Image (cartoon, helix red, strand yellow):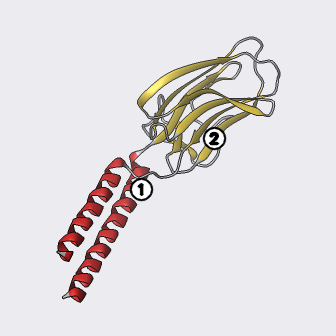
Amino acid sequence: MKISLKLCSIKVLCSFIATIFFIITASQASAIIMYDGWSVDDIDLSGYGLEDFETGTGPWTPSGNWSRVSPGDSNSGDYNMQAAFDFEINDSLTFNPITPVSGVNTFSFYHKFDLRPNLDFAYAEIREGINWSTLASYTGNQGSYQQVTLTFTPTSTDYGLRFRLETATAVPEPTILALLSLGLAGLGVTRSRMKA
């Protein structure tokens, strides 16, 4: 009798572990699909004019998950630049070097983003000399294109601009943690009933 109870307990435990593994694996796979990343279009920079990515990437150099995409997900025209979401990336769309005009320079763009709030961040950054600094940062979700206008006043001639997407590791969703807790509680109840 004790041997059959132990076998039953082992079967329940193995079944539970397999179920939790499946749920966590499925949730991480769906998270890649669930988030879109960061889309940028119609960049206008003082002294350089508008870049709408209709004929290529222009002076902007993509790295990692950044790519020119179409159709139908742009602010205007057919194309835009997008950093597709993935875990643990630090990818940039860079214009380097730029020659700023004298006085106040304007840097405007249209963008939308779909990121995990306070885990993944989109940065608009400027380089002066060798140091990059943040002009603006974004997290969470902005489902439609909105225009952003940033300004800077140059103090030298060595500048660069970039859009950088930095994402964190995969984190189990609260629902997964709740299911795991419920499963552990159920396993405890099952074991205590078997002992009684």
Q: Which callout, 1 or 2, points at the residue further toward the start of the chain?
A: 1
Apparent side of residue 183 relative to residue 34 in the rendered image (left or right): left
Q: Which residue is mark 1?
A: 28
Residue 54 can be seen, yes or no? no
Residue 7 can be seen, yes or no? yes
Marks 1 & 2, CB-CB < 8 Å contact: no
Secondary structure state at the residue bearing disc 2: strand
Label 2 environment density (alpha carbons within 10 Å; few <14, some 14–19, many ≥20): many
Find residue 139 and report its horizontal and vertical position in percent: 49, 34
Kind of residue at badge 1: Gln
Circle count: 2
Q: Is residue 153 above or below residue 9?
A: above
Kind of residue at badge 2: Ser
Q: Nearer the viewer, mark 1 or mark 2?
A: 1
Q: Residue at x 47, y 24 (%)?
A: 146
Find residue 41 and report its horizontal and vertical position in percent: 53, 31
Label 1 environment density (alpha carbons within 10 Å; few <14, some 14–19, many ≥20): some
Q: Is residue 153 above or below residue 68?
A: above
Q: Nearer the viewer, residue 20 or 62?
A: 20
Q: Which residue is mark 2?
A: 92
Query: Residue 71: which quarter of the image?
Result: top left
Apparent side of residue 162 relative to residue 121 in the rendered image (left or right): right
Find residue 35 and report its horizontal and vertical position in percent: 42, 44
Secondary structure state at the residue bearing disc 1: helix
Q: Residue at x 30, y 67 (%)?
A: 19
Query: Residue 95: which quarter of the image?
Result: top right
Apparent side of residue 131 relative to residue 165 in the rendered image (left or right): right
Q: Spot the residue most to the top.
A: 103
